[in-house]
Each structure stands twice: as C-alpha cells, then as structure tokens.
Image (cartoon, grey):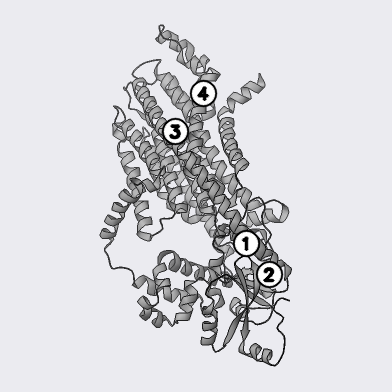
Amino acid sequence: MAGKQFLKKHENCILSLAMALILAGILAARFDFYYDLNDDVLIKDILSGVYSGTPDGHTMQLLYPLGALLALLYRGLSIPVFGAFLLFCQFGSIWAVGYRSTVLVDEERTAHEGASIAPGMCSAASAARLAEPAAARVCSARDYAFAARSAHPAEPAVCSAWNTTAARLGVKGVLLLVEALFWFAAMGSHLVYLQYTVTAGMLAGAAIFWVVTAKGTERFWALLLYWLSFCLRPEMALLCLPLAGAGGLCIWGREKQIFSKESLRHYLGLFAALVIGMGVFYGLDVLAYSDPDWKDFRQFFDERTTLYDYHLDFVEQYDENREAYEETGVSRTLQEMLKNYNFGAADEIDTQMLSSLAVQAKKTDAKESVLSQVKKAIWRLAHENWLSKSDLPWNFVWLAVVFAWCSCCLQKGNRRYFWQPVFVVCVGGMLWSYLLMQGRMVDRVTHPLYLAQILLAAGLWGTATSTAAPGINTRSTGRIHTVMTAAVCGVILLLCILRVPGMWQDVAREQTRRETVNRTNEDVFAYCEKHASTLFLEDVYSTVAYSEKIMLDRDKPFNYDLLGGWLVKSPLTKQKLSAFGYASMGEAARSSEKVCLLADEGTDMSWLTEYLEERGEPGMLLRIGSAGEGVEVYQFLSEERINEMFRGEEIDAED
C-alpha cells in the first residue's frame, strides 16, 4: 500500500524521468555522444587541466562560479565532468518539461471536473484545490464522487474514471510520447552532438515553461534552471530573458487582483530574485577576472568577438578596407593572419590593435536607417524562417501551438486574454529581428530560441482554460480546449514521425564523418606524444572539423596548441608556453628550436615567412614529415639557421 501511494504521489516525476531516460538510452545505444564544436572541446580541456596542466575555471565562456565548480569536480572525480554535466542539463530540461506538462494534465482535469459539479461556475472546492500545491491537486474519487452524483445523478462520476490507472497513465503516456518524438525530430542532432549554447537554451526554455505552468512558490524552482543557464552561456540566457519577462507578465495579467499586495509581492519578488541572482553570479565572474592580465585579455576577447561575429567581411577584405587598415597601422600580412585566424603568431596583434580595428569596422557598416533594417528583418523572418521549409519542424510546431493558443483565447470567457499571444509573438519577432540584423542566424542560436518560444506558448496555452471569466461554462470551454489539444498534438505527432527517419539518418551520417576526421587527429596527437620535447602549433582552420567523444574525455598531449582561436594570448596560454621556455606564441612560432608547425596538406603557410620577413627576420619553412594522413609537419628555419646548414651542421627537427 505504501509503495502504491508513493508511486501515485510521484507519478508525474517518475513518468517524465522514464521518458527522458528512455530517450537518452535509445540515443546512447545507437550513437556516441560528441562535443559539437572544438569550442566545447577547448572548454573541457581548460576545466579538466588538459590545456594548462591544472584544472581551471577561467574558460571565458562559462561564468566563473560554474567553471570553478566543474574544475573542482575534475580534481576529485575521474569522470568526464563537463560532458556528463551537459548531458545532465539537457535531459534534465527534457524531464522538467515532461514533469510540468503531466502535472498540468492533472490540474486541468481537476479544474474541468470540479466545474462539472455546478455548470456555469467554478465551485469553491475547485478554487481551493487549485490553490493547493501541484502534488496535492490530483483529482480523487473521494473529493468529487459524491458531489458529482448529487449534482448529476444521471451522469457517471467521470472523476473516478480519471483515477483509473490505465486511463490516467494512457493520457500522460501519449503526451510524453509526443514530447519525446518532438525532442528527437527537432533536437536530435543537438542531443547527440552537445553544444553548450544549445544546452543553455534548453535550460532557459525549461525554466520559462516551469514558470508559466506552475503556481505560487513552485515558480521559484525555475530560478535554479535560469541561473544555471545564465552561468553556462550568459548571452543565450539574456537573449531568452525578454520571453521570460513576457511569460511573467502574461501570468500576472491573469490574476483576479493584478495590483493586490500579494500579487505585487509574488511577481516582483520573482523578478527581483532572478535579476539579483544573475547579478551576483556576474559579479563573482567579474571579480574572478579582476587580475590585470585577465582584464586585458577579456577586453581582447570582447574586441575579437566584435570583429569575427559581427564584422567578418571587414576582417577578410583588405583591399576594400585599405584606408581603415592603413589608418590603424595594420599591414596586409597582419590582416592575413587575422583572416586565417592564426593571429597568435603575431605579437603585434594585441588589445589596442583589435580595439582600433573594431572601431574602424563599425564605421564601414552600411548607413541604413534602423526602420529600414527592421522592415528587411521582418520580411526575412517571415519568408526565410517562420514560413520556410528550411526551418522544419521548428516553425510548423511553433505556428501550430500559437494557432491553438489564439483559438483558445477567442473562446467566450478568454477573449480578454487575446492580447497575450499577440504580445508573445511580437516579443519573439523582435528577438528574431535582432538576430537577423546582427547576422547571428546560426542553428546553435536559432534552435534554442525556437524552443523557448514554443515552450512559452505551449505553457500559456495549456493553462488558458483555467483563467476563464466567472459565469462561463468552463465545461464546454474545456471540451473545445481538449479537442484543440488533441488536434495540435496529432499534427505535431504526424510531423515529428515524418521527420524522425531523416533526422536519424543525418545523425548517423554525421557520426561516420566525425569518426573519419578524428582518426587523423588521433594520429596527430600520437605523433606529438612521440616527440614530447617539441612544441607543436597547428593552423587553426586545419582543426575546425575535429571534435571528441564525450565519455572518452580525450587527454591530449600537453605539447600541442593552436596558432590562434579565442583562448590564444590569454594568461593560460602564457602559462602553457612558459613550460617550454617561451613568453608568447609569437616568440615560439618564429623559433628554430624545438618548435614545429602543423597544417593540412595544401595549406598555404607563406603568410608566416612573409610576416617574419616584414619583421626583419627572414627565413623559410621546411617540410620535415607527416603527422597523419594529410597533415604536414613544418619547421621554421631562420636565416642564421640556414647558414648553419650550409656550414654542414645537421638540423635535429624531430628530437
């Protein structure tokens, strides 16, 4: 008996957990989980100590409190902490959405059956039940059987039927099945190839869904999800923040007494707690980077982000921007190193230079009015995203949910809330327009934004019938709501079923590609380990296709690094180079002793000799071998070293 009571009490938690674990198990049985990008791999290398030799929380991407915690776990645990953390967050988000949706089913059913006791109005008993915690709000035969028989002696006690295990579990099982198919059809590749930006978006979306579907103090649990999202990827959490605000205003607007002391305390307290928490975490992050070296690098990092994320054309085009480059004092050879992302080899490329270039790049922006940019962004949003086949199934699911929500708000008793779907669509449109205007339409940003919009609309739609005006036949409204829910779930289910085979094949093909690419990189790492006393610096664009399996947590050789990227010139890079006797990567790159360069076969490496000749340090690159299939090994020979060769001295290139 006690076991049955426990299972029924925690039924929703168990069912949603089972759905998340089954989905994870199916994916794990067929595929290996990978870090999606080399950015994710580098974050892992920093946290685990693979990069600098010591686990460190200064990742520049995660806020330091989270980074420090993960680095601490790496010190004490022999598991792939960062990979396990991303998996936990992603499937934890799936669980949170499943849990809240099944609780919502119970709450809605309770409200509708309570209304059937006295048609045309919500009973005091129902109102009291809705004010209780979700776990205590499940409809029971004891609560309503007598009332149902008294009010409608000719009707069966439908509440008792709902408590039939098969009926109750059947409804929830179908709902969770639809959710599982949606997760794989829309997020399949992201669930296998994990990217921290996407994970942060999933946490933010789950938090928003929790807020709009929970009641009372239960909403404060969503703060933990949102704070975690903010610590993992601040930019994604901030991007979704207007949606969270829109959701909060919508549920606040449904209160009977909007400006009562209790409502003001609850909603303003919720918002204040969210903002204060984010402020505390950001403040701790600023404090962690208060060291002068880290402060300077942080500015360097921000200027680099401005150039590469928002003004890439300026970085890649020298002739078109010759005046700007000459005014900044950047030669063609330095611009070439910025273009090929190997700017670590040039000590001249520092914070001041990037700051000046960022200013010049902004001056080259097209002189177009904001209104004109917004009009173009809205047109592109409608034709290239929301109504385009390229965004399937995201856009169709989004439109289906919004349509169902609007239909619900057009029913008698809910029309006063029709402003809510319009408001949410407008807020979402503003965010999309911002991304279009900034040129940041990449899957790892747009897919989480779609997800947050869908979860927000679904949560507000799912709770819409509980806000019908007094005197309205909520039983009739509930039936319409049920029909709409079934219809939309059917459309989503059909769409996802059609999408799943293609997604499965895409993930499988990507798996094969990654395995092929990674074999070459494994050979490169083995070569570096064989020559442990030599420092190897690789061309950045020769490594962009590389990723790692999450559960292996590859321990790369310490004597390997990239010639550029977002971490180069950081205190961690200097710490690593100091172990080999170099003060900077530029010094290491032009060394003729114990340093070799790596690049894909056919890569033009003349930029290095041209740059060094410009510095008054002429020399040549000598190919001395191969580190793997299609990967060449070079050593720079200074003019002095070349003269030594002609005097008969042998070069010890592979010592």
The quarter of the rendered structure image containing the C terminus is bottom right
Classed neighbour count for the residue bearing mark 3: other residues with Cα under 10 Å, few (<14), some (14–19), many (≥20): many
Q: Closer to the N terminus: mark 3 or mark 2?
A: 3
At x 63% / y 25%, what residue is drawn? Answer: 6
- The residue tagged 3 is 493
At x 31% / y 48%, what residue is drawn? Answer: 382
Q: Closer to the N terminus: mark 4 or mark 3?
A: 4
Nearer the observer: mark 1 or 4; the answer is: 1
Give the residue type that dot 4 points to: Gly
Disc 2 secondary structure class: loop
Cα separation between marks 4 and 2: 57 Å
Q: Are marks 3 and 2 in contact (CB under 8 Å)?
A: no
Q: Is 563 above or below relative to 119?
A: below
Classed neighbour count for the residue bearing mark 2: other residues with Cα under 10 Å, few (<14), some (14–19), many (≥20): many
Query: Which label was assigned to residue 520?
Result: 1
Residue 494 in sight = yes
Nearer the observer: mark 3 or 1; the answer is: 1
Percent of width and height locating residue 588: 63, 78
- The residue tagged 2 is 559
The quarter of the rendered structure image containing the N terminus is top right
Nearer the observer: mark 1 or 2; the answer is: 1
Cα separation between marks 4 and 3: 16 Å
- The residue tagged 4 is 170
